[in-house]
Amino acid sequence: MRIESLLRSILVLGVVAPVAGAQNPPPAPPGTSCRPPGFFTAPAKYASAEPLPDRRVTFRLCAPEAREVLVTSTDYAPAIPLGFGGPAGLAMTKDTSGLWTATTSAPFEAGTFRYNFRVDGARVPDPQATRFSHERVGTNSVLEVPGDEGAFQAYDPKIAHGAVSVVEYWSTTLGAKRRAHVYSPPGYMKGNARYPVLYLVHGAGDSDDSWTSVGHANYILDNLIAAGKAKPMLVVMPFGHTPDRPGIDVLSNDDFGNDLLKDVIPYVEANWRTMSGTSSRAMAGLSMGGAHTLRYGLTHPELFGYVGVFSMGFMDTTLVKWYEKNNAAALTRGAKEFKLVYYAVGKDDFLYRSIAPTRALLAKYGIKDVYNESSGGHEWRNWRRYLADMAPRLFR
């Protein structure tokens, strides 16, 4: 009872005794600190990421003891420097309460952006954020900037929405527990119909969470399906990384392909109501996921009838020759059987020059592609649009 009384007193008073040896700062006088009072974390009285009417954004962080704070982002955002050729981050200034503030000088496009704070050199997600996006390692806060041009990838309360499930499975090929995200379209949970499947893979810096948390694949599909532009489908988003194997380079490492073909696809088809056959199965990916698609989608026309490659190709003739030598028979078959090969890249993408030799190889084998060359670079604002352009072409 004495312990229960002590805990009750702590909850009521909103205080806790300091840990022995901890260097706690002296309490600030009332009204001078930006910290919210009380024992429990509470929403602050300020917006930590506030889009303004002109689409500039004001960022705020309460960090009284910090010496330097910057806003950082791994996404393209004109007023948050990415660090290429200069400092990475937008400098913030601190007021007397310890609240750091910065407003971007340029507006954002409407859409979804990831951001964090760098506090005295340490990367810190926004403690007041409620939405996050997980990379291969680390976590980002997520900012939504409203606007008509971003509506295609935004939640619409007026339409029916599907669901995103997080599933774990045992990979027999890797001997490890693995994870994937699965989008099921509106109506899946209530009915018994079977659906075609798109296997959609993320890039090298991201995780199986990324295509929904920042890529908004689920909202993109919801909006397209509601408009009658895309067929209802399942979208399986596996984890594209596998355990590192010293001495094994990317080209000779088939771990992801073995996991996809021998574990992921059989798991999905055993546990979800899927349609069978190549006409009901597609694979696409961005960047590293595009490399996976080139290696395990484009080379398996007996499995996939539809293939999409975003922002990825073979950079030099050595890689093209290696790929052709190992996959000539599959490319020959694919030229006859693929229903769609979709290829997309931004003109400013650092991998742009890899696209022409890769497409030339496809053309050599008679594989015709639907080519989308957009503005912009290696970034999510492009990849969301590529998915929105490709999805209506699937399973027709």
Image (tube, rainbow, N blue to C red):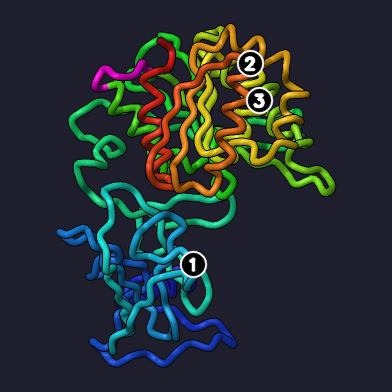
Q: Are marks 2 and 3 in contact (CB under 8 Å)?
A: no
Q: Earlier in the sequence, mark 1 or mark 3?
A: 1
Coordinates of residue 143 in the picture (x, y in percent): 33, 54
Amino acid at pointer 1: Gly
Q: Earlier in the sequence, mark 1 or mark 2?
A: 1
Coordinates of residue 190 in the picture (x, y in percent): 35, 16
Vertical arrangement, residue 250 with respect to residue 18, above or below: above
Q: Quadrant of residue 47?
A: bottom left
Coordinates of residue 290 in the picture (x, y in percent): 57, 34
Vertical arrangement, residue 151 with respect to residue 228, above or below: below
Disc 2 packing (10 Å; few <14; some 14–19; many ≥20): some
Q: CA distance from mark 1 to mark 3?
A: 34 Å
Depth-wise, is mark 2 or mark 3 nearer the camera? 2
Q: Which residue is mark 2?
A: 365
Q: Is residue 87 visible?
A: yes
Whether 324 is among the magenta residues is no
Amino acid at pointer 3: Tyr
Q: Secondary structure at mark 3?
A: helix
Q: CA distance from mark 2 to mark 3?
A: 17 Å
Q: Which residue is mark 3?
A: 296
Q: CA distance from mark 1 to mark 2?
A: 41 Å
Q: Residue furthest right?
A: 247
Residue displayed at 30% across by 47% down? 111
Give the magenta part as a residue range. Answer: 226-232
Main SS category, magenta section = loop
Q: Which residue is mark 1?
A: 83
The count of marks equals 3
Vertical arrangement, residue 123 with respect to residue 170, above or below: below
> Depth check: 390 or 39 in front?
390
Coordinates of residue 377 in the picture (x, y in percent): 44, 47
Disc 3 packing (10 Å; few <14; some 14–19; many ≥20): many
